[in-house]
Image (cartoon, helix red, strand yellow):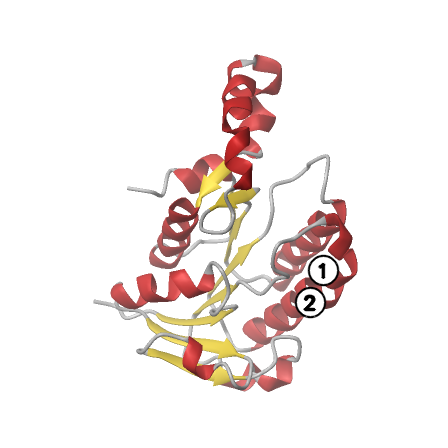
């Protein structure tokens, strides 16, 4: 079996902390970029690398031998009032990661973007779109996932909207937007990320909500 060496940022976050154990079960060799002092937050079997995701020089030379790079750094609980944080954290981190991964010879870059266009969260969307642009510009093979809202522990308020989504999906004029901006379960998102690692992209592929859902067994 061809062992996959994976470098991951945001490994202690909401999605990353749940993804790492799944990748370990798949036999991946993981290196997780973590803030100094957070080394013990990553599961046993995952090698922590203390560094700053906003400073490429703190980790660029330690990406190898990983050929897969997963970018999960982001401001928690995004909202319109966090526009400046998106630019200072989400944007700066993807700028650093894309530059470092490209220089390190990464063969597959995995990025969690956001579904767009959408009527709200414009600052967040613009930052994520810029991340996508940087990835395309780098020339790396990449998988870009575009979720809208992921339902899971501590993130369930939007489940009250499920009946509304169902109605919108029945209406031809609203079906496409309702599907593209659909709600995802946490397990859907995790399964899609694992699938992206297992089946590297050739070129740049974009997985919208319906494709992300299809990854769940």
Does the CB distance between marks 2 and 1 fall below 8 Å?
Answer: yes
Give the structural element (helix, strand or loop) at label 1. helix
Q: Residue at x 35, y 74 (%)?
A: 43
- Say which mark, if any, is on residue 86: 1
Q: Quadrant of residue 88?
A: bottom right
Q: Position of residue 18 (x, y in %)?
A: 39, 61
Instruction: Point out the image quarter for the N terminus.
Output: bottom left
Count of labels in the image = 2
Q: Is 64 above or below relative to 165? A: below
Give the structural element (helix, strand or loop) at label 2. helix
Q: Is 51 above or below relative to 180? A: below
Q: Residue furthest left?
A: 1
Decide which of 191, 75 is in the foreground and name it: 75
Decide which of 22, 199 is in the foreground and name it: 22
> Seen in the image, is 17 located left or right of residue 90?
left
Q: Position of residue 15 (x, y in %)?
A: 47, 58
Q: Residues within 10 Å of mark 1 (few under 14, many from 20)?
A: many
Q: Position of residue 102 (x, y in %)?
A: 57, 71
Q: Residues within 10 Å of mark 2 (few under 14, many from 20)?
A: some
Q: Residue at x 26, y 65 (%)?
A: 25
Q: Position of residue 162 (x, y in %)?
A: 50, 28
Q: Quadrant of residue 135?
A: bottom right
Instruction: Point out the image quarter for the C terminus.
Output: top left
Identify the residue position indicated by label 2 in the image. Answer: 89
Q: How far apart are labels 2 and 1 at the CA level? A: 5 Å
> Seen in the image, is 205 located left or right of residue 2?
right
């Amino acid at each position: 079996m061809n062992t996959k060496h994976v470098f991951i940022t945001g490994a202690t976050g909401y999605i990353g902390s749940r993804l790492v154990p799944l990748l370990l079960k798949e036999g991946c060799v993981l290196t997780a970029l973590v803030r100094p002092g957070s080394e013990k937050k990553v599961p046993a079997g995952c090698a922590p690398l203390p560094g700053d995701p906003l400073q490429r020089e703190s980790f660029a030379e330690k990406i190898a031998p990983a050929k897969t790079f997963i970018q999960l750094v982001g401001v928690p609980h995004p909202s319109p009032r966090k526009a400046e944080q998106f630019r200072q954290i989400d944007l700066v981190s993807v700028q650093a990661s894309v530059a470092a991964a490209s220089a390190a010879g990464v063969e597959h870059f995995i990025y969690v973007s956001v579904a767009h266009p959408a009527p709200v969260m414009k600052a967040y969307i613009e930052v994520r779109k810029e991340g996508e642009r940087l990835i395309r510009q780098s020339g790396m093979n990449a998988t870009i996932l575009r979720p809208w809202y992921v339902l899971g522990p501590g993130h369930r308020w939007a489940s009250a909207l499920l009946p509304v989504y169902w109605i919108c999906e029945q209406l031809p004029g609203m079906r496409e937007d309702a599907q593209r901006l659909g709600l995802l379960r946490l397990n859907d998102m995790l399964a899609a990320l694992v699938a992206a690692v297992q089946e590297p992209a050739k070129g740049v592929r974009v997985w919208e909500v319906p494709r992300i859902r299809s990854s769940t067994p």
